Image (cartoon, grey):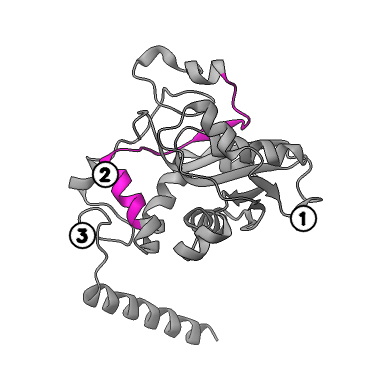
Amino acid sequence: MQSNLKQNQGFTSLLTAALDVLLPPRCAGTGEVVDTPGMISPAFWGELGFIEAPFCTACGTPFGFENALGMMCAACMEYEPDFDRARAPVVYNDASRQLILDFKHGDKMHFVHTFIPWMVRAGAELIEEADMIIPVPLHARRLWKRRYNQSAVLAEELGKRCGKQHLPDGLLRMRATVPQKGMSRKERRDNVKGAFAVNGRYLTALPGKNILLVDDVYTSGATLNECAKTLKKHGAAKVSVLTIARVTREEF
């Protein structure tokens, strides 16, 4: 039996090597050949703005000065978020935006293998304390047009990678909302108010649990706050947020 297992492992290794020759892994940003799937080329790596401390202890927005460790940003002090903490590995800039748009609208779902290691590193503490992972849902009409929910793809892969329970339909989007670009903070909050509901199948599973809410980009935080508020209304003890990227400039 061990002999058969070794033979199968050897065959798998040969098959992987052959595929790498025929279809070598490529950088998601530049298309250059790289060593392993999901890897980013050194040239493109330099274009990505990775977030390091110090950053806001609540929403994770990076600070531009060194002595801000352990501080909250002005926006979170003025309006305390409904979620407990939010983290993202990269700033939403030209480089990360193109990757995310290709992942979101260009059917390049394999980019998930690029994003997940970044998210695992940035959200290590949040993942460790999470009991379950729930993605931000799409409305049914938008899901039909797009064919998949990119946040659900991320949440599923995180669950597999980290051994956490994943509820792809834990939250439901009850009504379609209009795009929020150009709206004020209040308009954004009003736009998503009451737009989400907990799936009835999981109402008894939420009380006392720590939830990790997953989305692709943290923009104004309005959608994430409304999702967190909905989950806490049904008994979630904590709701943390993990995204690929974090918007730091209002024009995005």
Residue 17 in the image, given as x and y percentages of width and height: 29, 75
What residue sits 61% from the left and 30% below the top? Answer: 84
Q: Residues within 10 Å of mark 2 (few under 14, many from 20)?
A: some
Report helix, strand or loop for mark 1: helix
Between the C-alphas of marks 1 and 2, the distance is 39 Å
| Magenta stretch in the rendered image | 79-102
Q: Which mark is residue 95?
A: 2
Residue 5 in the image, given as x and y percentages of width and height: 49, 82
Q: Which mark is residue 200?
A: 1
Question: Quarter holding the C terminus?
Answer: top left
Relative to 19, say whether 198 is above or below. above
**Residue at the top extreme of this rendering:** 67
Between the C-alphas of marks 2 and 3, the distance is 13 Å
The amino acid beneath tag 3 is Gly
Residue 85 inside the magenta-drawn segment: yes
Q: Earlier in the sequence, mark 2 or mark 3?
A: 3
What residue sits 77% from the left and 58% below the top? Answer: 201
Question: Quarter holding the N terminus?
Answer: bottom right
Q: Residues within 10 Å of mark 3 (few under 14, many from 20)?
A: few
Relative to 218, say whether 32 is above or below. below
Q: Earlier in the sequence, mark 3 or mark 1?
A: 3
The amino acid beneath tag 1 is Gly
Along the horizontal axis of the image, is 105 left or right of 98?
Answer: right
Which residue was labeled with disc 3? 31
Badge 2 vs badge 3, beta-carbon distance below 8 Å: no
